[in-house]
Image (cartoon, rainbow, N blue to C red):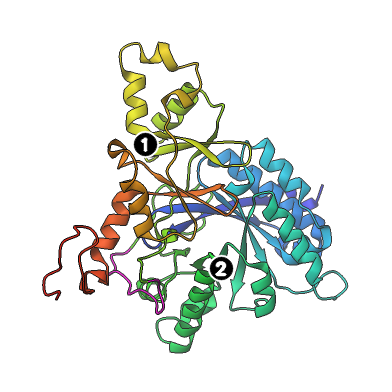
Amino acid sequence: MHAWTSHLRFAYQPVVDLGTGSVTALEVLARCGRGDVLAEACRDPELDAELAALALRSAARREGLLPLHVNVFAATLAGLGDLSALRRAVREAGRRPWEVTLDITPRPASAPGGAPVPREALLAAVGALREDGFRICVDGIGAGDPSLLLLADLSPDLLKVDAAVVAGLPHRPAYRAAVAGLRRFCDGVGALLAVEGVETELQYASARAVGAHLAQGHLFAPPARRPAVEVRVPVCPPAAPPDGRDSQGPPVSEFLHPAVLLPLSASASQVRALLTGSPEVTGVMLVDHDGVPVRAVDRDRFLLAMSGRYGHALYADRPAVRLADRPRTVRVGATAWEVLDVVAAGDSGRTADDVAVVDEAGRCVGVVRLAEVIRALADSRMEDAPGPDRLTRMPRPGAG
């Protein structure tokens, strides 16, 4: 046991969706009252892996629904090839790998002994973690970040732009061009773009203008010993779409909310306890052991059935699938219009249900809500395009 253990604490900082203003995840940050534990961890892969596991366990005691971001150095992955302690912590906490994003810091880019991080070992370790369902983020882009070739080979699910770059966005056109280029890269590989260290409303507006999806910073909520219940999101005009955005509308990634997942074997009582204890949850996805959604529970219909006459007696101790429907799904790379197509093709009584977003393996990575999609499309610049309006199918005013 390391001497610093008794001085170690963890803080939680929310990851905010810039499109909806909602909290999509929590990053778990290690804090130590004695010495620089992070500097020691970057030299000691075993210590770094232990910190990641402790961070997960700490978060499991504090918060049970939101996805988590846990930090790890690239040299740790390349050196160990596995994070067995973290995997064990995930299982013990009742979490699933796809609820955990590994924020990989490529710098300092030296393994013990001063040698560069072995490229192939790093790629192999990341591949194995991704195969098991963990989501991959490359952290600190713009400050000692990896080579473009390594970044492309890692093909992360998320990029995080360093706070030093974000600080320059409002007054440095070259910084804005660089981050807009990262957004185009993200669109090409199906990733999300996040910015760190947002301190001012001007930085917030600039991040939106260059196409960032997610953000962290003191403007929303500082790291705290307890997960933030609410965040401050400034009023800001809608950001103009980045150059080159698909003409078929914004991608579903801009509307993504964390999915609340339970195993397919969950009882109706378990689902009811979750819904009544979390009024912000609109639905639950029942997934198989691989994280593939098999049934979807809508909050309103489920609670209505449970509160009806004999509802508790009929369903409480039985599988929740009895009160669930087949999920409506779209792929990660889908557009907002494709969401509308999926909803329009389904049962008219389920138009308000969450739509599950799945990755290439069919695993649920989040949900989108129809009201937000419609609102964004109604405000989009597509209204100015010639031809019939896609919402009403009627000619637009002024269209030939």
Q: Which residue is mark 2?
A: 189
Secondary structure type for disc 2: helix
Q: Earlier in the sequence, mark 2 or mark 1?
A: 2
Among the 4 quarters of the image, the one containing residue 328: top left
- Magenta-colored segment: predominant secondary structure: loop
Q: Which mark is residue 78?
A: none
In the picture of the structure, the residue carrying the numbered disc 1 is 279
Residue 216 vertical position relative to residue 304 in the rendered view, above or below? below
Residue lying furthest right = 113
- Magenta residues (range): 234-246
At label 2, the amino acid type is Val
Kind of residue at disc 1: Pro
Q: Residues within 10 Å of mark 1 (few under 14, many from 20)?
A: few
- Residue 305 position, x and y percent, is 34, 22
- Label 2, label 1: how many angstroms apart (C-alpha)? 35 Å
Residue occupying the point 79% across, 51% down? 3
The quarter of the displayed image where residue 39 is located = bottom right
Residue at 85% in and 69% down? 112
Does the stretch in magenta take in 170? no
Decide: is 319 above or below 261: above
Q: Are marks 2 and 1 in contact (CB under 8 Å)?
A: no
Mark 2 or 1: in front is 2
User: Is residue 242 highlighted in magenta?
Assistant: yes
Whether residue 40 is visible to the viewer of this picture, yes or no, is: no
Image quarter where the C terminus lies is bottom left
Q: Is residue 294 above or below residue 19?
A: above
